[in-house]
Image (cartoon, grey):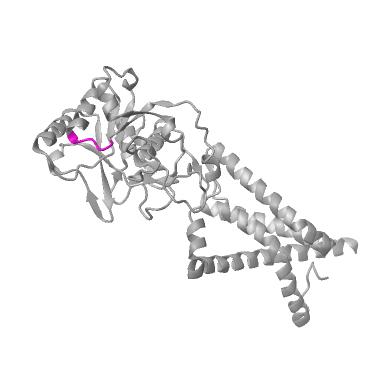
Amino acid sequence: MNFTMISEKNRLLWRDSFICTILTIIVSGILLLIFVNLNVLDPFYKAFKDFSFTDLYYSRIDKNQKIDTDIIVVNLGNSDRFIIAQAIEKIQQNKPKAIGLDAVFKEQKNTFTDSILKSVLVKYDNIITSYYFDEDTLVTNHKYFEKENATEGFINMNFSNDDAVIREFLGLKKPENKLSFAVQVALKSGRLKESDIKKLNENIPINYFGGLDSFLTFDIEELLELESIPSIENAIVLFGYLGTPTGNPFDIEDKHFTPLNKTFVGRSSPDMFGVLLHANILKMLTTNNFISKVPKWLVYLIALICSFFTIMLGMKLYKRSELIYDILIKIIQLVISVVLLYLALLLLKLNIYIFITPVLVLTVFGLEMIDFYVYLLDYLKKRFKWQSYLLN
């Protein structure tokens, strides 16, 4: 008899937990739609829409870590094409693996300087030029600078929202079958195999190495004044814009938001120049230091399971004492939040990325739904004599 009663209680507990979990999903979905579509909440939505808890990990990257010397960045600044051509020649003398030009020469300017730059671009086979997509249009170098069988890659960081935080990159864009700038540079340097390209046709999380202080950098004028640069031998050299002067925090030309930004919510200014983004991606590609992304279906399955068992625990506390439940609920929610965030950051440290927000929201919100579920049970019991673990 006692065993039968225990079994019935367990059955009702599992049923109540399941129904409450479904209600949690429905209500949270409705609240999300309201939050996204209600105009009065636009300022809050814009502030939080591009926030990710995993940004906490990247924003604390140690600036004192070892500087990478395998990838060297040269600041083009506002240099003319003659200076750029001279710098390329200077670097080629030191035998780099590859040179990437994060710059598009869309039109002709000066006949003399253009001819010098063209001769340099045509002369060497280890130079990778760039282009970008402007909606459905390709913006490339002027035909004057074109070279037969030239190696080039797209420099777009985001194909949907220019203001978004750059957490992922696309290495192979379909259906055009175009390769990104960083992928082309990695291939040309011999540090990325062509067989690895097939896994780059979907968005991949960027494993950030660091910002300006994490790479060996030169101003283009400084570079030309040096007699020799031994560090360039067998290195990858990227030309791009790093501000005027180098690293100017108020210069936002070709600058993007990244998880390394110290301000998590309501960012006012971007934090990383485009060429440094390419350098981080290139570092990841050439060292095969990828981040594995937990599939969305698995994330939502985990969220459903966590929410279910947390609600079950909450119902047991509620059944024992409503007072104990009211006292402990906030503490439990806090502990769950801290544990889930810690696990997400720990996984990221192990190069595994999980979108933890659905798990966190459904688990914490599910405990709040128990009180509302009790009101629903009162109605069902009076009208339909509904059996429930919480009210029986």
At 42% from the left edge and 47% from the top edge, which residue is drawn? 257
Q: Can residue 170 be seen at all in this image of the molecule?
A: no
x and y percent of residue 202 in the render? 40, 47
Task: Please say whether residue 119 is one of the residues in the magenta stretch.
Answer: no
**Which residue in the rendered view is the most extreme toward the left?**
111
On the rendered structure, is 11 left or right of 46?
Answer: right
**Which residue in the rendered view is the most extreme toward the right?**
1
Q: Please give the range of residues in magenta.
A: 77-81
| Rendered image quadrant of residue 249 | top left
Number of numbered labels in the structure image = 0
**In this rendering, is residue 360 above or below 240?**
below
On the rendered structure, is 246 left or right of 117?
Answer: right
**In this rendering, is residue 156 above or below 370?**
above
| Rendered image quadrant of residue 83 | top left
At 47% from the left edge and 25% from the top edge, which residue is drawn? 66
x and y percent of residue 238 in the render? 31, 32
**In this rendering, is residue 86 above or below 386?**
above
Q: Nearer the viewer, residue 260 or 349?
A: 260
Q: Nearer the viewer, residue 373 or 368?
A: 368
x and y percent of residue 360 in the render? 62, 54
Q: Nearer the viewer, residue 371 or 67?
A: 67
x and y percent of residue 169 in the render? 40, 45
Q: Quadrant of the C terminus?
A: bottom right
| Rendered image quadrant of residue 305 | bottom right
Q: Can residue 390 be seen at all in this image of the molecule?
A: yes
At 28% from the left edge and 41% from the top edge, which residue is drawn? 153
Q: Quadrant of the N terminus?
A: bottom right
Q: Nearer the viewer, residue 251 or 68?
A: 251
Q: Main secondary structure of the magenta part?
A: loop
